[in-house]
Image (cartoon, rainbow, N blue to C red):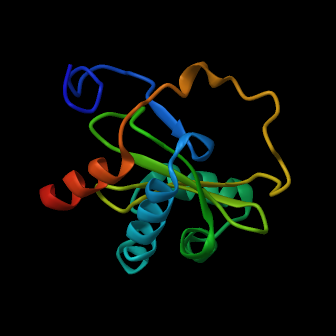
Amino acid sequence: MDRFGVFGHHHYIMARKHIKQMSKDEIAFVHGFLRGQVNRLSANVHHFYDRANDRKFTFEDAKTAVAGGIVIEIHNDRNPDVRVLVRNKVGTCAVVSLKTFEVITVYYNAPTDEHETLNWNAYRWNQNVVELIKSLRRAA
């Protein structure tokens, strides 16, 4: 097991942390880091364009969501990648890699959705988000 609570990069481990589980410092840090990278965002993955076209979103919609939205969760479900899910006030959601700054997918979720039926079993990642992002910055 590595210092981020996961086994090597070839294993599929669901490790997620929801905004409700983050400290104020973690929330501020992840938002500051992500918003500082908006100009680095790209959409070079087929999955993004397939999903965006199916769902009638553009890359600019995704960038706008990242620039002004709220980070809902951070996860390493695709370890060694670390991704964040961001939702803005009109419901545009974008998943962004914090390693490559690629927008992975974009979709709509009502901004009033509080996810009362969310399965919290996947949200057991005790990772300190500030330290995680600092380590990503050092590796970049």
Q: Quarter holding the N terminus?
A: top left
Q: Quadrant of residue 115?
A: top right
Please determine whether, in this image, residue 23 is positioned above or below residue 33.
above
Q: Is residue 90 left or right of residue 15?
A: right
Numbered disc total:
0
| Position of residue 103 measured from the top left corner of the image (x, y, whole percent) | 47, 60
Q: Work out whether residue 114 or residue 93 is closer to the camera in this orientation and state it.
A: 114
Q: Quarter holding the C terminus?
A: bottom left
Outermost residue, bottom side: 39
Q: Quadrant of residue 80?
A: top left
| Position of residue 15 measured from the top left corner of the image (x, y, whole percent) | 43, 28
Outermost residue, front side: 24
Residue ID at (85%, 54%) = 112
The answer, for residue 43, to whether it is visible in the render is no
| Position of residue 17 measured from the top left corner of the image (x, y, whole percent) | 50, 37
Outermost residue, left side: 139
Residue ID at (48%, 51%) = 84
The answer, for residue 34, to whether it is visible in the render is yes
| Position of residue 139 measured from the top left corner of the image (x, y, whole percent) | 14, 55
Q: Work out whether residue 22 or residue 31 is closer to the camera in this orientation and state it.
A: 22
Q: Work out whether residue 8 or residue 3 is closer to the camera in this orientation and state it.
A: 3
Residue ID at (29%, 24%) = 6
Please determine whether, in this image, residue 133 is positioned above or below residue 78.
below
Residue ID at (52%, 56%) = 24
Q: Quadrant of residue 4?
A: top left
